[in-house]
Image (spheres, helix red, strand yellow):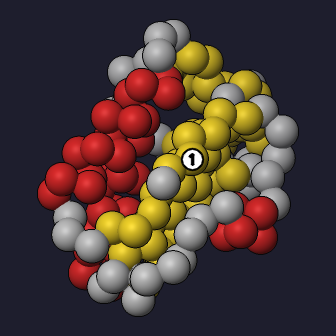
Amino acid sequence: LHRLIRRQRQMCIRDSYNRLSTFGSGSLVVHFGIVKPVVEERRTKGIQFTQEGDLKREMEDLEAELRKKWDGIKDVLFIRRMGNLHIGDIILVAAISASGRESAFGACREAVEKFKKLKCIRKRELFEKF
């Protein structure tokens, strides 16, 4: 099972956990990416994300790649927010439940790194003006 969710509104951490199946799992790893206050030594007000292309397909391909590489994955949850986000807002959730921690940690880390390289997402930092 997998759930690929693109949303603009803020999300609840508990809701993210409740969407993930842990049946048969021995480990669950969740990463929350958040908007940073400083980027490239410059203060920001937030960040803007826009979608150009088939995000769902790209995320499905990422999930398939992770399942092929990492043994024992039981469930995958990706949530990606779009639009204007403020400092501290959750940008993404990458969660992996697996039979063991090695696969859960490894697959989650790989998912987070590949999220940064998704081709159909455009990112624009909203830097403060002095």
Disc 1: which residue: 3
- 10 Å crowding of disc 1: few (<14), some (14-19), many (20+): some
Q: Residue 42 at what x, y percent from top left?
A: 58, 40
Residue that appears at 37% across and 63% down: 108
Instruction: Give residue 127's quadrant in the image.
Output: top right
Q: Residue 99 at what x, y percent from top left?
A: 33, 82
Residue that appears at 50% across and 27% down: 56
Instruction: Give residue 50's quadrant in the image.
Output: top right
For the residue pair 33 and 21, the one nearer the viewer reads as 21
Q: Residue 123 at what x, y percent from top left?
A: 53, 24
Residue 82 seen in the figure: yes
Q: Secondary structure at mark 1?
A: strand
Residue that appears at 18% across and 53% down: 68
What's the amino acid at mark 1?
Arg
Q: Is 71 displayed left or right of 12 in the figure? A: left
Residue that appears at 46% across and 41% down: 40
Up-down: is 116 above or below 105?
A: above
Q: Is 61 displayed left or right of 26 in the figure? A: left
